[in-house]
Amino acid sequence: MKRFYFDLAGALTACDRMGHQCASRREAKEHARFIAHRIAAVRPPFAQPGNYIRVRDENGVEIFEIPIHVGPGYSMRQVA
């Protein structure tokens, strides 16, 4: 299992210092989607353009971003 880090980025930022173990990048993407969906549901004001979950690998390299928004059709921007 590898450790991935899920940062809140955009208007408000928060750096994930503990991380979360995932079996693969695919699992990390699913976890990031879950986090983005949960934030949008619990804190709707955060669901706006420019706010996203930044995912970093064990080396701190950003590998992708998941936008935080309300509604279906999550898109993902691949970074590395």
Image (cartoon, grey):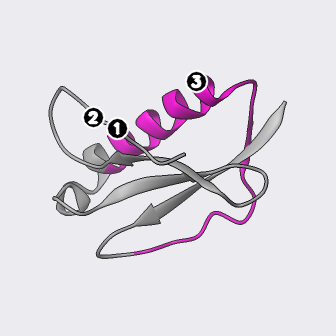
**Sooner in the amino-acid sequence: mark 3 or mark 2:** 3
Residue at image mark 3: 26
Measured along the vertical axis of the image, is residue 56 above or below residue 50? above
Q: Give the image quarter of residue 73.
A: top left
Q: State the residue at coordinates (29%, 61%).
A: 51
Q: CA distance from mark 3 to mark 2?
A: 14 Å
Q: Residue 76, labelled with which disc?
A: 1
What kind of residue is marked 3?
Answer: Arg
Badge 3 marks a residue whose secondary structure is helix
Q: Nearer the viewer, residue 48 or 25?
A: 25
- Whether label 1 touches label 2, CB < 8 Å: yes
Q: Which residues are magenta?
A: 13-39
Q: CA distance from mark 3 to mark 1?
A: 12 Å
Q: CA distance from mark 1 to mark 2?
A: 4 Å
**Sooner in the amino-acid sequence: mark 3 or mark 1:** 3
In this rendering, would 60 be left or right of 47?
Answer: right
Q: State the residue at coordinates (35%, 56%).
A: 52
- Whether label 3 touches label 1, CB < 8 Å: no
What kind of residue is marked 2?
Answer: Ser
Q: Quadrant where the C terminus lies?
A: top right
In this rendering, would 76 be left or right of 31?
Answer: left
Q: Quadrant where the N terminus lies?
A: top right
Q: State the residue at coordinates (63%, 63%).
A: 16
What kind of residue is marked 1?
Answer: Met
> Residue 8 at x, y = what percent?
45, 63
Residue 60 painted magenta: no
In this rendering, would 35 be left or right of 23?
Answer: left
> Residue 72 at x, y = what percent?
17, 26
Residue at image mark 2: 75
Measured along the vertical axis of the image, is residue 10 above or below residue 27? below
Measured along the vertical axis of the image, is residue 6 above or below residue 11? above
